[in-house]
Image: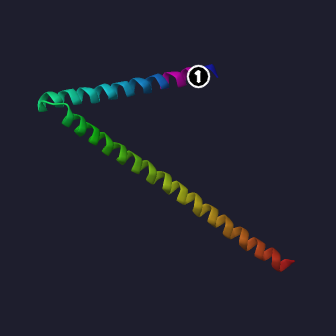
Amino acid sequence: MQEHRSGFAALFIALLAALAAALLLLVALVVWLADLMGGVLYPCLIVGGFMALIAIIVYNVSLRHTLRAVHEEILAISEIAKIIRIALSWLGRLI
């Protein structure tokens, strides 16, 4: 049990480090664009819009996968309901 905790802790720390690195990369990108463009407003809008676009794409991809899984579960439940309906009909004719 203790080994699992240390593994999760290491994974959590690695994820935090990756998040910090990504944020620093975004800040560096904004600073670099601000230096090229001579202002801060447009680089912030450009980088923010790009990150919003990435978030929308990731959300849609993950949502599509989730909806496909839900659809498969609904089909399975529908098949089970059909089998139960047939079994009850058959039992009703026997009684």
Using residue 72 as the reference point, say whether residue 54 is left or right of it: left
Colour setup of the view: rainbow
- Does residue 79 belong to the magenta stretch? no
Name the residue nearer the viewer: 81 or 35: 35
Locate residue 39: give its quadrant.
Answer: top left
Image coordinates of residue 93 in percent, x first then y, are: 82, 80
Q: Residue at x 17, y 31 (%)?
A: 33
Residue farthest toward the bottom in the current orientation of the protein: 93
Image coordinates of residue 7 in percent, x first then y, are: 54, 23
Residue for badge 1: 5
Q: Which residues are magenta?
A: 4-11
- Does residue 6 belong to the magenta stretch? yes
Question: For the residue marked with disc 1, what is the amino acid?
Answer: Arg
Q: Residue at x 61, y 61 (%)?
A: 76
Q: Residues within 10 Å of mark 1 (few under 14, many from 20)?
A: few
Q: Main secondary structure of the magenta part?
A: helix
Location of the N terminus (image quadrant): top right
